Amino acid sequence: MPLKIEPITRSHNRRNFDCGSLDLNQYLQNTARQQSEKGISRTFVLVETNSPGEILGFFTLTACEILVEKMPLRFAKKYPMRASAAKLARLAVARSRQHQGLGTFMMLNAMERVLLIAEHMGIIGFFVDAKDEGAAGYYRHFGFIPLPDNPLELFLPIATIRKTFLGQ
């Protein structure tokens, strides 16, 4: 079935979504759309084109500010004390669709969106707070680098995203 990623709306069935994490389910059901409407964050849902109301997965992007001293030294020396970045606030796939590549599909879409943001606004990269070591390993697979003081906080330099998508 053809898949598409689109901004969350009232037409998406948030109540039936279950990714196996109560926190992520509750965020999608109770908070995601409202925060998108208020401009706090943006949540995007993955749906099949022939069943656009059923959410197969979702991710949330937001802006953040990073204290550069928290970053690996090779990056920290390049930037001022504080720098702007994008953050992957949440990423989840419905239980029934896990281990089918949908997380990767959404992650690549999120990275493309971050690259578009970087064309219009100064950001140094893409951050994520992994919930556990297993999730951190998943993000490292995409090139995310753990921060020295907390290996569950990871950073993907904007240059790495450019190289991935643009070959630069």
Image: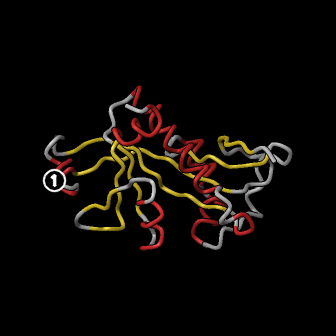
Q: Determine the image quadrant of residue 163.
A: top left
Horizontal side, residue 43 vs residue 82: left or right: right
Q: Quadrant of the C terminus?
A: top left
Question: How many neighbours does mark 1 have within 10 angstroms: few (below 14), some (14-19), or many (20 or more)?
Answer: few
Q: Position of residue 148 (x, y in %)?
A: 23, 64
Give the total of numbered labels: 1
Q: Nearer the viewer, residue 39 or 80?
A: 80
Residue at 75% x, 68% y: name it: 96
- The residue at the far right in this view is 50
Q: Determine the image quadrant of residue 14.
A: bottom right
- The residue at the far left in this view is 77
Q: Position of residue 150 (x, y in %)?
A: 28, 68
Q: Nearer the viewer, residue 158 or 168?
A: 168
- The residue at the far top in this view is 120
Q: Position of residue 64 (x, y in %)?
A: 36, 47
Up the image or down, 71 lies above or below 108; here it is below
Label 1, secondary structure: give it. helix
Residue at 70% x, 69% y: name it: 95
Q: Nearer the viewer, residue 120 or 34?
A: 120
Name the kind of residue labelled 1 in the image: Leu
Task: State the scheme by which the image is colored.
Answer: secondary structure
Horizontal side, residue 95 vs residue 77: left or right: right
Residue at 61% x, 49% y: name it: 105
Check disc 1 and report the residue beneath it. Answer: 73
Up the image or down, 166 lies above or below 129; here it is above
Up the image or down, 146 lies above or below 162; here it is below
Horizontal side, residue 63 vs residue 38: left or right: left
Q: Position of residue 53 (x, y in %)?
A: 80, 49
